[in-house]
Image (cartoon, grey):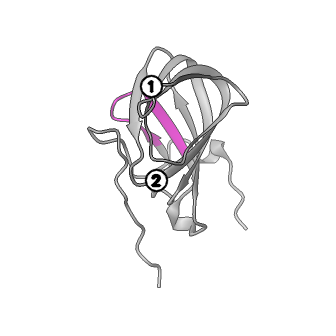
C-alpha cells in the first residue's frame, strides 16, 4: 500500500513545471509504482493557452477548480470545462485548453508517465519507460 500527499511531493522530482511556464503538475502516482496508470494534480494558469496531443497516451481529466475552454481540433467543437466536468482523450485528440481562471484538475494517464515528461513542439509527451527493477 502506498499513502502519499500532494503536500509531501511539492518541490520534489514529482513536482514538474512546464518549460512553457503555462502549467505545473504534481505527479503522485508514476510508472515506477508499476500499477498501470499515473495520477497527477495539474494547475494550468489563467490567461494561458496550451495545445496538446497525447499521441502515446490516453488521458482522463476531472476539473476540480477554475474554468477553461477546451477545443477539440479533430472536430472543431469547443467545450466549457468547470468543476465536476470530466473529459477523456480516448482517441488521442489534438486539443487546446484556453484557461479563464486557474484550472486545477486531476489527470490519469495510460500508459503511465515517468514524471520526466514535458510537451514537445507538437504538444506530445514522449513515451518514456522505467527500467525493470529486476
* Residue 76 location, quadrant: top left
Looking at the rendered structure, the secondary structure element under dot 1 is loop
Q: Earlier in the sequence, mark 1 or mark 2?
A: 2
Assess disc 1: are there few (<14), some (14-19) or many (≥20) residues with their C-alpha within 10 Å of its C-alpha. Answer: few
1 and 2 marks in contact (CB < 8 Å): no
- Residue at image position (46%, 53%) is 57
Assess disc 2: are there few (<14), some (14-19) or many (≥20) residues with their C-alpha within 10 Å of its C-alpha. Answer: many
Foreground label between 1 and 2: 1
Relative image position of residue 51 (x, y in whole percent): 38, 31
Relative image position of residue 109 (x, y in whole percent): 54, 52
* Number of numbered discs: 2
Could you say which is closer to the camera, residue 77 or residue 67?
Answer: 77
Could you say which is closer to the camera, residue 35 or residue 74?
Answer: 74
Residue furthest out toward the front: 75
Horizontal side of 101 relative to 93 (left or right) equals right
Residue furthest out toward the left: 121
Label disc, if present, on residue 89 of the rendered structure: none
* Residue 52 location, quadrant: top left
Looking at the rendered structure, the secondary structure element under dot 2 is loop
Label 2 sits on residue: 57
Could you say which is closer to the camera, residue 66 or residue 78?
Answer: 78
Horizontal side of 130 relative to 89 (left or right) equals left
- Residue at image position (42%, 34%) is 74
Relative image position of residue 73 (x, y in whole percent): 41, 30
The region drawn magenta spans 16-26
Label 1 sits on residue: 76
- Residue at image position (45%, 46%) is 92
Amino acid at each position: 500500500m502506498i499513502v502519499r500527499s500532494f503536500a509531501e511531493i511539492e518541490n520534489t522530482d514529482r513536482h514538474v513545471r512546464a518549460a512553457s511556464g503555462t502549467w505545473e503538475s504534481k505527479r503522485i502516482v508514476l510508472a515506477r509504482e508499476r500499477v498501470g496508470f499515473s495520477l497527477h494534480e495539474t494547475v494550468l494558469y489563467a490567461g494561458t493557452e496550451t495545445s496538446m496531443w497525447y499521441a502515446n497516451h490516453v488521458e482522463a481529466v476531472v476539473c476540480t477548480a477554475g474554468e477553461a475552454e477546451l477545443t477539440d481540433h479533430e472536430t472543431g467543437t469547443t467545450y466549457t470545462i468547470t468543476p465536476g466536468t470530466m473529459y477523456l482523450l480516448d482517441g488521442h485528440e489534438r486539443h487546446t485548453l484556453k484557461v479563464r481562471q486557474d484550472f486545477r484538475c486531476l489527470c490519469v494517464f495510460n500508459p503511465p508517465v515517468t514524471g520526466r515528461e514535458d510537451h514537445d513542439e507538437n504538444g506530445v509527451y514522449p513515451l518514456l519507460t522505467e527500467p525493470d527493477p529486476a
